[in-house]
């Protein structure tokens, strides 16, 4: 039976699925905060026989009513030029399955080609697009699915509130394969050690988002809510 192909940004997000037995596990690829890599990875998963594409991972908050750990089931992915609707039946099935497990909401996700690091950038994007959250992989994954006529959905958990500013060097620590470079983090912290408190807060909120994603994967199981 064809499996769902999953695109994440980070390897730590991909590792959430390690709890599923390998013979039933979705095929997962980490794209390392890049729409282009996400599109290429999604195309490869479809070539390998996957029947649908899911974008799964953390996201930046644009709607200030959503706290870190809130799970967004996307109704669409929007970019600067294109809009990709999510598969309605899949979205509805996931929403029903996740009822009662925590803070879960619908909304549009903006697919950005650059990180939105400041509150001003987040506010401008929210006002312009009406999106609830932003990430850097969903747009590419959605484009690949649309090109092949494959069902698409994005499930993303808020990792940084709309009011939180992200230090620019945080993005430098993300490797193309989705891994993290501890050396880049240490290099950034050494000349400004006081910023470690902000990093601790960001790590705490990301932990909430990853915990929520773990509960989502456990509740949805190997099919991830999609009836192949």
Image (cartoon, rainbow, N blue to C red):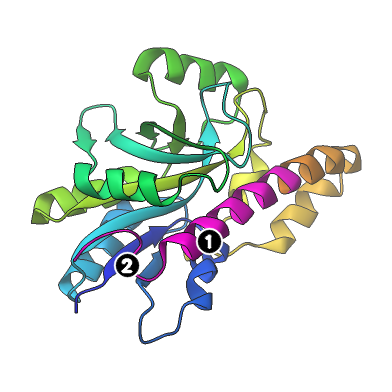
Where residue 8 sits: x, y (%)? 43, 58
Residues rendered magenta in the picture = 204-228
Residue 208 left/right relative to 148: right
Where residue 188 sits: x, y (%)? 77, 47
Judged from the image, the secondary structure of the residue bearing numbered disc 2 is loop
Q: Earlier in the sequence, mark 2 or mark 1?
A: 1
Q: Residue furthest bottom?
A: 23
Q: Residue at x 75, y 46 (%)?
A: 204
Query: Is the N terminus in the top left, top right, bottom left or bottom right quadrant?
Result: bottom left
> Principal SS element in the magenta part?
helix
Crowd tier of the residue under label 1, counting other residues whose Cα lies within 10 Å: few below 14, some 14–19, many 20 or above: many
- Determine which residue is flagged by label 1: 13
Query: Is the C terminus in the top left, top right, bottom left or bottom right quadrant?
Result: bottom left
Where residue 172 sits: x, y (%)? 60, 50
Residue 138 left/right relative to 135: left
Q: Residue at x 57, y 55 (%)?
A: 174
Q: Please tell me which residue lies in front, 146 or 155.
A: 155
Label tally? 2
């Amino acid at each position: 039976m064809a499996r769902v192909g999953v695109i994440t940004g980070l390897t730590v997000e991909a590792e959430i699925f390690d709890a599923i037995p390998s013979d039933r596990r979705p095929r997962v690829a980490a794209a390392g905060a890049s729409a282009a890599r996400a599109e290429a990875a999604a195309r490869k998963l479809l070539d390998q026989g996957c029947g649908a594409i899911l974008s799964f991972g953390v996201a930046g908050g644009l709607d200030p009513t959503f706290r870190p750990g809130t799970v967004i089931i996307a109704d669409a992915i929007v970019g600067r030029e294109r809009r990709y609707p999510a598969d309605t039946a899949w979205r509805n099935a996931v929403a029903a399955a996740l009822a009662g497990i925590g803070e879960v909401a619908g909304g549009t996700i903006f697919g950005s080609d650059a990180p939105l690091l400041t509150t001003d950038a987040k506010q401008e994007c929210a006002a312009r697009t009406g999106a609830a959250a932003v990430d850097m992989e969903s747009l590419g994954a959605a484009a690949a699915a649309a090109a092949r006529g494959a069902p698409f959905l994005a499930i993303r958990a808020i990792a940084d509130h709309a009011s939180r500013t992200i230090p620019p060097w945080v993005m430098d620590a993300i490797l193309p394969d989705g891994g993290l470079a501890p050396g880049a983090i240490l290099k950034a912290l050494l000349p400004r050690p006081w910023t470690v408190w902000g990093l601790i807060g960001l790590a705490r909120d990301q932990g909430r988002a990853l915990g929520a994603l773990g509960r989502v994967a456990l509740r949805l199981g190997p099919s991830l809510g999609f009836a192949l």
